[in-house]
Image (spheres, helix red, strand yellow):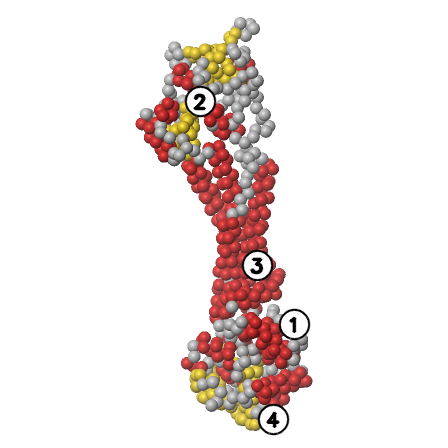
Amino acid sequence: MFFEFLRLAGQSIAHRRLRSWLTVIGVFIGIAAVVGLISLGLGFEKTVNDQVSGIFGVDTFIVVNEGSFAGGPPQHGGSGDEYALDLELLNSIEGVKVAAALRERTGFVQGQPDADGEQLQGFLPVLGLSPELLTEFESFTGELKVMSGGRLFEPGDVEVAVLDLEISQRLGVEVGDTILVAGDGSNELTLTIIGIMAPQDTEEDDSGGGFGAQFGSNSEGDTISVPYGTMDLLWGQADDVLVTLVRTEPGYDVDEVADRAEEALNEQGSEIMTITYGDISEQIGQFTNIANAILAGIAGISLVVGAVGVMNTMFTSVLERTKEIGVMKAVGAKNSHVLSIFLIESGLMGLVGGIVGSAAGIGLAVVFTKIINSGGVFMGGVNMAIVISPWLLAYTLLGSFALGALAGFFPALRASKLPVVDALRYE
Amino acid sequence: MALLEMQGITKEYKLGKTIVRALRGLDLTIAAGKVVAIMGPSGSGKSTLMHILGALDTPTGGTAKIDGSDLESLKERQLVALRGQKIGFVFQTFNLIQTLSAQRNVELPMIFQGISAGERHQRASALLEKVGLGDRVRHRPNELSGGERQRVAIARALANDPEIILADEPTGNLDTETGNAILALLKGLSVKDGKTLILVTHDPEAAIIADRVVRLRDGCVESESAGGEV
């Protein structure tokens, strides 16, 4: 019988074609907005997640200062983002395959005498990085390039340095020359320059480059990069570690290892916290959920407007068809039959609005994504993903039918309760 | 036993603030298989009586029995079943569903009885054939003439093979010739199929085909006569 009622309702809708379409448009706009906005949100979430997981991998965590990720106030004075670290201890923790760190401070540096015998010297940023950063964590650092004739750090390097192009020119040094770097107290080392950073192709800095910039070295800067261990020789352990990357052994749970590392290091007096891919993913999820809820709320308003439109159309329809309802009842229709026919009719209008609206919403999301991607404005030129969620579509279609039926409920109830004699008399 | 038994029927309803007494203690008994014309001036209570005879409405007082069932004791859904199975209506203004074809209009009462699509289709086709519209099944009401529409309405009234056909001014919107053809068709239902036919009408022609003519005035039976004459 449902199928018959569906047919009756469909014929009635088709008969009032223009008004039905106008009603459907009311629903359609709301649904298109909901589907479009949520699809964009899902695309954004997927893109960010993919980017982060591409860099991070599931077996890696990072160690940062306690206050720097959770949004709390910095624990120390100054910028507060640095911390002290016992890298050897970290490397010895069960489940840690390799840990690599980055630290930075300002040191006194002396270059080679120039043609006039003048020797440039001064305080410059000195960056200490574990050679493993370059070999094991390339996804974080991006591809660093040195000019021909030079090389980057290798495990075992100690008294060596890699210079940014600009500072190498100012210091008047080339690969093979030496510079002097002074540390704490009487600590000082003569470092052999093994490489000079190559100028970057700034125009087309491909994916991952954004993170590479964080690691300090570039051709225009004035940074002196040295192996991490060399920093220890110059300054010992100090509150100057920016970030540490840790890869776990296969078979170990990354969250467990991270917890162990956090505990062990904090016992040593470091004030650090660890962040795994799961933590970041959760944060992204929370953010996008809130954003989606707000967007869906806004779009929901237009759905309410659409529902009111359906209700209005159905009330009009009931009034117009009062006599028809009387006839149906006279020929044996129960109240529930009349109720069903009108509910199906309004539900159908909702459903058609849902189908057309979903298609338009996906279209909108695709177009917007293309515009965003062609503009290259998203995350340093990363292409945003297009996500078409079958769940979203299923819920939307179900919801739009329910919305229509709900909006049509009171009109349908009124229709079903009409006394048959009055309905037949209605002109 | 009488098919329709009305005893001391009163019906009052409110029209604004005034109470209208449409029927005032009406007695009427109709035997199965007869053709009865109910006539009377406007306001005599014809329509109200027809509503009660058709189980569309219940009386305020008195006893109304249709095929032995007292309307007062029936629940709403039993009234619906009674209308759907035992009574077929024919209206002055045809009251066909404009969005449906002739075929679908005739099928409509069967849909509400839950009859299968195949049987419905077959019966509707046969009924349209019977009323002389075998070639018009796919037409919508607005593509049919008045006489043709009334034929569709008669086919619809017959859909669930009811015992009683209630026709409210069936010729009121038709010219004399077409009206007479419709009356002949209705008469045939009684003569050939044994249906009980009740005509509520102003049309003196209708009285000619009736076995009995009942005249109402002021909510009561004023007079009765045998049919076949004016």
Alpha-carbon distance for marks 1 and 3?
28 Å
Would you say the residues marked 2 and 3 are in contact, meaning their CB atoms lie under 8 Å apart? no
Decide which of A222, A285 is in the foreground and name it.
Answer: A285
Residue at figure coordinates x 47%, y 19% from the top left: A154
Q: Which disc, if any, is residue A23? A: 3
Q: Which residue is mark 2?
A: A130
Residue B139: which numbered mark, if any? Answer: 1
Give amino acid for label 2: Ser
Q: Are marks 1 and 3 in contact (CB under 8 Å)?
A: no
Pointer 1 local density, CA inside 10 Å: few below 14, some 14–19, many at least 20: some
Residue A126, image x and y in percent? 46, 18
First in sequence: mark 2 vs mark 3: 3
Residue neighbourhood size for the residue with mark 2, other residues' Cα within 10 Å, grouped as few (<14), some (14–19), many (≥20)? many
Give the Cα distance between marks 2 and 3.
66 Å
Output the chain of dot 4: B
Task: Chain letter for mark 2, please.
Answer: A
Name which of mark 1 and mark 4 comes first in the sequence.
1
Label 4 crowding class (10 Å Cα cut-off): few <14, some 14-19, many 20+? some
